[in-house]
Structures are given as structure tokens and as C-alpha cells.
Image (spheres, rainbow, N blue to C red):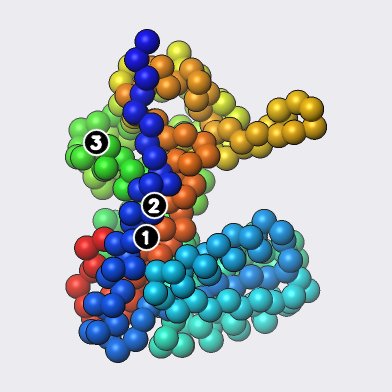
Amino acid sequence: MSQAQIIDGKAFAEGLRARIAAAVPEFAAAAGRVPGLAVVLVGDDAASQIYVRNKGKQTIEAGMNSVEIRLPANATQAEVEAVVVSLNADPAIDGILVQLPLPKHLNEAPVINAIDPDKDVDGLHPVSAGRLVAGLPGLVPCTPMGCMLLLRDVLGDVGGAEALVIGRSRLVGKPIAALLTNANATVTLAHSRTHELSAHVHRADIVVAAVGVPELVRGAWIKHGATVIDVGMNRIDAGGGKTRLVGDVAFAEAVTVAGAITPVPGGVGPMTIACLLRNTLVAAHARAGLAPPSV
């Protein structure tokens, strides 16, 4: 029985970060400074702290300026928004990321909307979303961009391909559907109300699963030779008081049918921070009036 090509997101992300690091000195020579990324963390959520620490480490390794602003869990709405406004005005900062989720007493939307769209490296501002849908230059959410880079690496041109996106979140589903549409794929966006999901999957040349349901997509659903991008990160019981990480696709089944597939972990996950650095470099070039970097 044939096995699908395993799409190594970890290796691709390492290569992308290396290309970004190589491009930073050229930017610094032209702009007189290095790109700057600011991350705002409110509260003491353990997972967010680890993620922010990893972002800072990789930002520095890429030769960029890393700024971390930590606010207490009881910070007010006005205090958080004031930090964002101050970063908008800071000429040394090219990218602003507010680590989500925020504490429950805070309203995320006004905080995100306060970010200068030209510094919105998470791609969540409504202006960023509008630019993406309109096919205009702008900053794209990191995980969907990572998915597209992996798809292009495996397939080259996705034009004309039948693509199914499962999940319609503003973080992944809707942006990756827009990116695939802009790349001339024929896109179906499925969700919790979709009837006969398996039939939609079976028609698709490209399946992007981003719904957050462990092993929802079964191997028998997948078209032979399809390319499968599994964005899901679900922790399930592994017995003996242990857990294991699985995606939204039943990997052991799908790997015998698909042409190429991302594993979980080690597929899409490593791409997210690498694409955050890419967005920061892209934003820095745009703000300095330079041509987009070729990374």
C-alpha cells in the first residue's frame, strides 16, 4: 500500500526563518534599522506565556528587534488600547501582535481594531481582512499563509484545483478560503451546518481541515492522491493518564490514500511563527517604501 508524501512543516519553517534572517541585513542597510515586532501579553495564561517566549526567541534569532509588553490580568480596556496606540506611533515597530485570548473582562474587537492595519502582523484587523478578500496587498493571518506556502511547495500552481476548507473561523478558515480563491482554486467552504461533508471531501483535490474536531475527516472520505493540510491541534486521552496530540484528520487512515499530508504535530504548527516573522519583514519593507522581500 502506497504512503502519502509527509509534508514537513518543521523543515520548511526552518528554511523560511533562515531566508528571513538572511534578508534582514539588506533591509537594515536600506532603512538604517532592523525590523521591529512588538507582542502585547495581558495576564498570566501559561500557554500564552510559552508562545510569547517562543516568538521573542525566534524574532531575535532572525536579527529583528523584539519588544514584549506585559500587562497584569486586571488591566483595563483603556490601558490595553493605549498600549496599542503607543506602538502604532513608534517608528521602530513594524509589527504589533496582541496575544489572544485576552482576559474575559476585556473586549478583543476594539483592541484588534486599534492596531494600525499596516502593522497588523496577525492579519485580524477588518482592513486586513478586506484587503485579502479584495486581492489587495496586505498582511495575511499567519497560519493560513503557512498553509498556502506548504501547498505551493508541494503542488506549485493550485489554479483550477477543487479545494475544500473545513471550518469558517476568521483566524484560519475564511482567510485560507480567500487565499485559495485568489490563487484561482475552486473553493468550497464547509462548516458545522454542511450536509454530507464526506461527499464534499471526496471531490476535493485539496482538503484544509481547520474545525477543531479530533480526527473528524476519515481516510475513506479522501480522494485518492489529494493533498491534505491538517490545521487541527486537539489533545485527546491516550490512556494511563496520558494525552496525545491529533489533528482534525484521521492521519493513520488518510496517509494511505492522500498524495501528500501534513502530520500533527510537525506540519502546519511550526509555520505560524515563521510566517509572523515574514509578515513583520513584509510590513517593515512596506513602511520603509521598499519593494516586498522575496522570502
Q: Earlier in the sequence, mark 3 or mark 1?
A: 1
Using the image, tell me which numbered label, if any, was put on residue 290. Answer: none
Left or right: where does residue 269 sit relative to residue 152? right
The mark lying in front, picked from 3 and 1, is: 1
Tell me which residue sits at (30%, 89%) in the image: 32
Marks 3 and 1, Cα distance to the nearest angstrom?
21 Å
| Crowd band around label 1 with a 10 angstrom C-alpha radius: few (<14), some (14–19), many (20+) | many
**Name of the residue lying farthest toward the top:** 1
Quickly name the residue at label 2.
13
* Towards the viewer: 283 or 178: 283
Q: Which residue is mark 3?
A: 155
Q: Which residue is mark 1?
A: 17
| CB within 8 Å, label 3 to label 2 | no
Q: Residues within 10 Å of mark 2 (few under 14, many from 20)?
A: many
Q: Residue at x 38, y 78 (%)?
A: 35
Residue 226: percent from left, percent from top: 33, 24
Instruction: State the residue in front, 20 or 136.
Output: 20
Residue 137, image x, y percentages? 27, 64
**Amino acid under label 1?**
Arg
Q: Amino acid at mark 3?
A: Leu
Task: Note whether 266 is above or below 188 in the view shown.
Answer: below
Q: Secondary structure at mark 1?
A: helix
- 5 in relation to 94, above or below: above
Badge 3: few (under 14), some or many (20 or more) residues near its Cα, within 10 Å? few
Measured from the top left, where is residue 150 in percent x and y?
33, 43
